[in-house]
Amino acid sequence: MIYLLCHVKSVVLAVAGLVYLSGDGETGKALVKVCYQAVEDPVRSVEHGSASWYSIRTNSGTETASGKRLCDKAATAAHKTLPMGTKVRVTNETNGKSEIVTITDRGPYVGGRIIDLTIGCAERLDFVSRGEVPVKVEVLGHFGAR
């Protein structure tokens, strides 16, 4: 309990130290500027395997298993078993690029693959032309908590 209180106090002080007022020379109005650093969720589990990508065209539309609309540029993915809404960090093991995505669909349905990413994610992770790449999938935070 004491550790938790000290940790919360440290976070509050850090945020307070990053909030400051500055005058706007033109109008004299005070502007509040807030700077923050995202605190990463703890890694709950890790999975290694192959990732592929899919799109509205290859999915034959925008319907997903979660009911959320599929968007080619969104940071979303399909996984066979993780609860909908789970956040995962996917790292392309050939180049080290990573992105945090939300599970919104089921799949992939091809043997040996552990996750299907949107084509937008595949572009950002630099593997669209390959079609499939070895990845590390880290489950973040609480299952389906967000």
Image (cartoon, grey):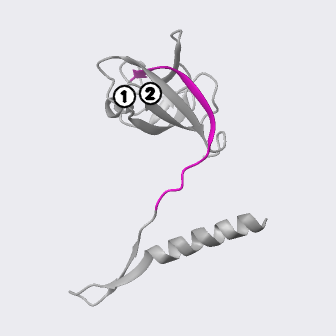
| Residue extending furthest toward the left | 26
Q: How many numbered badges does the structure rendering display?
A: 2
Q: In the image, residue 48 lies at what x, y percent?
A: 54, 23
Q: In the image, residue 76 lies at what x, y percent?
A: 47, 34
| Residue extending furthest toward the right | 1
Helix, strand or loop at label 2? It is strand
Question: Badges 2 and 1: C-beta atoms under 8 Å apart?
Answer: yes
Crowd class of label 2 (few under 14; some 14 to 19; many from 20; radius 10 Å): many
**Vertical placement of 4 versus 107: above or below?**
below
- Look at label 1 and name its amino acid: Ala
Q: In the image, residue 65 lies at what x, y percent?
A: 56, 27
Residue 125, image quadrant: top left
The residue lying toward the viewer, choosing from 23 and 17, is 17
Q: Which residue is mark 2?
A: 117
The residue lying toward the viewer, choosing from 18 and 65, is 18
Q: Which residue is at 61% across, 34% downward?
A: 84
**Vertical placement of 82 versus 132: above or below?**
below
Crowd class of label 1 (few under 14; some 14 to 19; many from 20; radius 10 Å): many
In the rendered structure, does residue 50 fall within the stretch colored magenta?
A: yes
Magenta region: 37-54
Left or right: where 18 falls relative to 23: right
Q: Quadrant of the N terminus?
A: bottom right
Helix, strand or loop at label 1? It is helix
- Look at label 2 and name its amino acid: Leu
| Residue extending furthest toward the bottom | 28
- N-term mark: 2 or 1: 2
Q: In the image, residue 43 lies at what x, y percent?
A: 61, 41
Q: CA distance from mark 2 to mark 1?
A: 6 Å
**Vertical placement of 114 versus 89: above or below?**
above
Q: Which residue is mark 1?
A: 122
Residue 13, image quadrant: bottom right
